[in-house]
Every structure is written in structure tokens, then in C-alpha cells.
Image (cartoon, rainbow, N blue to C red):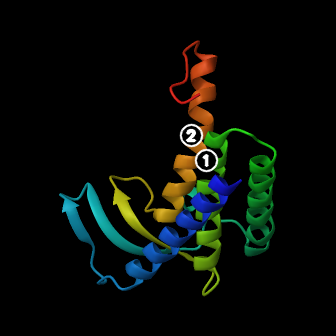
Amino acid sequence: MRRFLLIALAALGASVLGAMLTRRMPDSPIFLWGDWLALRHVENPGIAFSINLPHQALAVLIPLALLLCCYLAATSDDPIDHSAYGLIVGGGVGNMVDRMGDGTVTDVFQVGSFPVFNVADSCISVGIAILVVPELLKLLGRKPLLR
């Protein structure tokens, strides 16, 4: 569980720091690679992929999902699972902290036409990929790289 807690705290710290730095950005986007890759300050009231749900639903669903991840981490003896759940929980709590002020999360990374996202979203996505990709490989009859 120590791995889970350390990774969750690191993801939380990176998420909060990323949001703080993004809020200090200029209003105009910073184009890094044409208009395909940019840093753009966006306040997002939604959740993953900018999906909008009522605030009451967010206030219940997000903490429940994070508690489920904590439970799954606590019941697993696999350090890879601990890492994945740590990223998910740290990113999720980071977005909850960011949402506390005005009900929005601070997004910054724009890649192509994909919805703008932030460090916390990246942590959550990588954590989910660590859990899901090996299972998909098993379904395809391939040996996972990490397990």
C-alpha cells in the first residue's frame, strides 16, 4: 500500500501544481506544434471528455469511484495495480480539489480535436490504461508486457 499512497500523493501534487500554473497562463493559447498541439487555459465544468453531469451527480459519483479504487488497491497484492490505482486516485482527488473553487477543473493540453485535458486527467487515463491494456492483450491471446 505504500506504493499506492506515494503515487497517489505524487499524482495529486502534480495535478494541483499543473492547475495552479495553468491559471497563470496568458489568455491566448500557446501553440507548440502548429495548431495540432497547444497549451490552452479552459475551465471545464464536465468530467471525462467534457461530459456534463449535474453537480449533485458529480458530488456522489466521483467520491464513490475513488473509494472503489482505494478498496481495489487495498485488496490487491500486485504492485502494478497499486501504481495504477494510485494514479487514478491522485488524479481524481486533484480534479476534486481543483473543482472546489468554482465547480470547474482547469484544463490545459490541447491535442488535435481531442477535448482539452489536464495533468489529473492524464494520471487517470494512464492508470486506467495500466489496468485495461494487459486484460485486452490476454483477450487477444498475447502476453502482457508488465505482468
Coordinates of residue 102 in the picture (x, y in percent):
60, 86
First in sequence: mark 2 vs mark 1? 1
Coordinates of residue 28 in the picture (x, y in percent):
27, 79
Can you tell which quarter of the image residue 94 is in? bottom right
Can you tell which quarter of the image residue 91 is in? bottom right
Amino acid type indicated by mark 2: Ile
Q: Is residue 75 above or below residue 36?
A: above
> Circle 1 — which element?
helix
| Camera-nearest residue between 13 and 1 | 1
Amino acid type indicated by mark 1: Ala
Residue 130 is labelled as 2
Mark 1 nearby-residue class (10 Å; few <14, some 14–19, many ≥20): many
Coordinates of residue 20 in the picture (x, y in percent):
45, 82
Q: Are marks 2 and 1 in contact (CB under 8 Å)?
A: yes
Q: In the picture provided, is 100 more to the left or to the right than 16?
A: right
Q: Residue at x 62, y 19 (%)?
A: 138
Q: Residue at x 43, y 73 (%)?
A: 18
Q: CA–CA distance between discs 2 and 1?
A: 6 Å
Q: In the picture provided, is 87 more to the left or to the right than 119?
A: right
Q: Residue at x 71, y 53 (%)?
A: 1
Q: Residue at x 38, y 63 (%)?
A: 109
Q: In the picture provided, is 116 more to the left or to the right than 140?
A: left
Coordinates of residue 146 in the picture (x, y in percent):
54, 30
Residue 33 is labelled as none
> The C terminus is located in which quarter?
top right
| Camera-nearest residue between 8 and 133 | 8
- The answer to whether residue 47 of the structure is visible from this angle is no
Residue 84 is labelled as 1
Q: Is residue 33 above or below residue 104?
A: above
Counting labels gives 2
Which residue is situated farthest in the front direction here?
Answer: 2
